[in-house]
Amino acid sequence: MDKLDIDSFKVKKPVQLDDVDTYNDLGAKNQMLRKYLKVVSNELAKFQDKLYAHGKYGVLVCLQGMDTAGKDSLIREVFKELNARGVEVHSFKVPTELELGHDYLWRHYIALPERGKFSVFNRTHYENVLVTKVHPHYIMNENIPGVDSVDDIDAAFWERRYRQINDFERHLAENGTLIFKFFLHLSKEEQRLRLLRRLRLRQKNWKFSPGDLKERKLWDEYQACYEEAINKTSKPHAPWYIVPADNKKAARLIVASILLESLKKHKDVKEPELDEEIKANLEIFKQQLEKEKE
């Protein structure tokens, strides 16, 4: 398998999505990719144990991508070796009436990870500069002061949103949340094939919606919105990673490897030392338990 350079996926300067590959098999066959993923996932599970014991950081994993990019299966495969109590997955759909009664970041804020745990956002706060930018009339449901018609949603409005999102993430990072943002970069042709698969396989039919085809017609608009959002919000404390998504198994391994290698750089994450008195009496405690067997 090709050596994985996680920095090659990180957005450090402005990018054009048309210039970024959507396919990468890492030079390995599917069986090998699955094998390596299991190894990396097990290592992530070990780190999770230390993260929980350490109790100072939470990990926020944000997944964005076009329909069929593989977000659901990636979550299942990457995190299945971790303790289920330490990973919470949140799937953000159309805002509810309750959620619309608050500002657009509220529902994301209350889903943030506790210290020692992972939160995975399947679609994220970035929907508020993606789907709402492609469909600005959705903004009218938010009842924002000064936004009385779609005409009020101008370039300055979106710049404010980017600033608010950057401020939100900076606040999180400064208070112990480790942020990872992944854009699963899918080609339009691969999406066509995956939508066809949903139609051809009866067990996959439930995943298909005619709305998928309507949104597909807006492909170029969505790509432009993703490109702008990524370029305006990829920061050292909250970087974006562009992950080729045409090969699902490779995409899963890339995401898992980025998480593991980045998290392991936090050398302060370790199990707490035992109280000196307890440590001094470990042998006595062991003897007490061994005597019970008798």
Image (cartoon, rainbow, N blue to C red):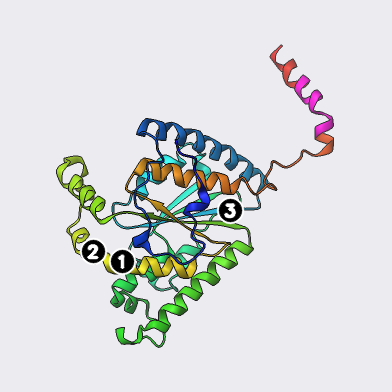
Q: Nearer the viewer, mark 2 or mark 1?
A: 1
Q: Nearer the viewer, mark 3 or mark 2?
A: 2
Report the amino acid beneath label 1: Tyr
Q: Nearer the viewer, residue 149 or 44?
A: 44
Which of the marked residues, 2 or 1, is nearer the chain's N terminus? 2
Label 3 and label 2: CA atoms lie apart by 34 Å
| Residue 142 sits above or below residue 176 on the image | below
- How far across and how far down the image is residue 151, in percent? 31, 87
Q: Tell whether label 2 touches label 3 (CB within 8 Å).
A: no
Labelled disc at residue 222: 1
| Residue 151 sits above or below residue 238 on the image | below
Q: Which residue is mark 3?
A: 58
Secondary structure under badge 3?
strand
Magenta part of the chain: 279-287
Secondary structure under badge 1?
helix
Label 1 and label 3: CA atoms lie apart by 30 Å
Q: Nearer the viewer, residue 128 or 88?
A: 128
- How far across and how far down the image is residue 118, in percent? 53, 49
Q: Nearer the viewer, residue 237 or 26?
A: 26
- How far across and how far down the image is residue 199, in percent? 16, 47
Q: Is residue 290 visible?
A: yes
Labelled disc at residue 215: 2
Q: Tell whether label 1 touches label 2 (CB within 8 Å).
A: yes
Labelled disc at residue 63: none
Query: What residue sits 56% from the left and 49% below the top?
Result: 117
